[in-house]
Amino acid sequence: MSGAAKASEMAFRARRAIRGLDMALDKEPALFIEQDGKHWLNGPASLLIAEKGLGCEDLVESIKMGGGRFREIFVQDIRLELIGLPCGGLLVLLKNAPLNGGPNAVLTPKEKHVLIMLVKGLSNKQIAHNLKMSPGTVNSHLDNIYRKFGCSGRLQACLTALNRGLICLPEKKQKQKALV
């Protein structure tokens, strides 16, 4: 196949993909965010957001916070696929996604406590001491968390918990200088 034929074939495939995306935007929940922060939401996305009890502005803010660093983020139990567009905007496809990997993969209260301490940066030994359990039990809880999140380590588990909104980091209080 010559170079011109390859280019023609690529252009044909690209046009077909764009037409398919255009048709999907009528049916699939989607959100478009312009560079200046203005956003547009299609009907299915409005319904999904309302069904989940989310505010559109809060969702857009979450996307802006993660948009430059992630291709996929989770807000409650919605998986957001972020697609950067050549015009500088961001197309966001909204998908229903169970919070913890599957319908039966809900964190137990003990796993949640372990996860909170993990996000705070405590070691297994410190977590065991604080929760009055053995380090082996902490390891068991961590293994369960990793399996439920579909990840393999501490950092991934922390990022997953933060991205899915399961854990919120406390805002740092700035020390105020005393006026003399």
Image (cartoon, rainbow, N blue to C red):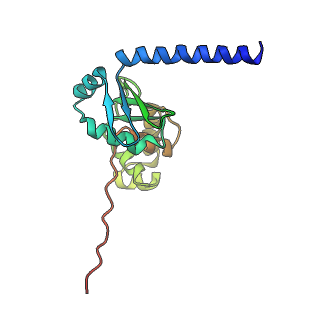
Residue drawn at 36 percent across, 48 percent down = 116
Q: Is residue 163 left or right of residue 175?
A: right
Residue lying furthest right: 2
**Does the rendering let one see residue 166?**
no
Residue drawn at 68 percent across, 18 percent down = 7
Image location of residue 136, percent across then percent down: 47, 44
Q: Quadrant of the C terminus?
A: bottom left
Image location of residue 106, percent across then percent down: 34, 30
Residue lying furthest front: 4
Q: Nearer the viewer, residue 101 or 42?
A: 42
Q: Which quadrant holds residue 140? A: top left
Residue drawn at 32 percent across, 30 percent down = 40
Residue lying furthest bottom: 180
Q: Nearer the viewer, residue 89 or 57?
A: 89
Q: Quadrant of the N terminus?
A: top right
Residue 162, above or below 103 = below
Residue drawn at 39 percent across, 24 percent down = 102
Residue 23, above or below 70 = above
Image location of residue 114, percent across then percent down: 38, 46
Residue 11, above or below 49 = above
Residue 33, above or below 177 = above
**Does the rendering let one see residue 34?**
yes
Q: Which quadrant holds residue 89? A: top left
Q: Nearer the viewer, residue 23 or 139?
A: 23
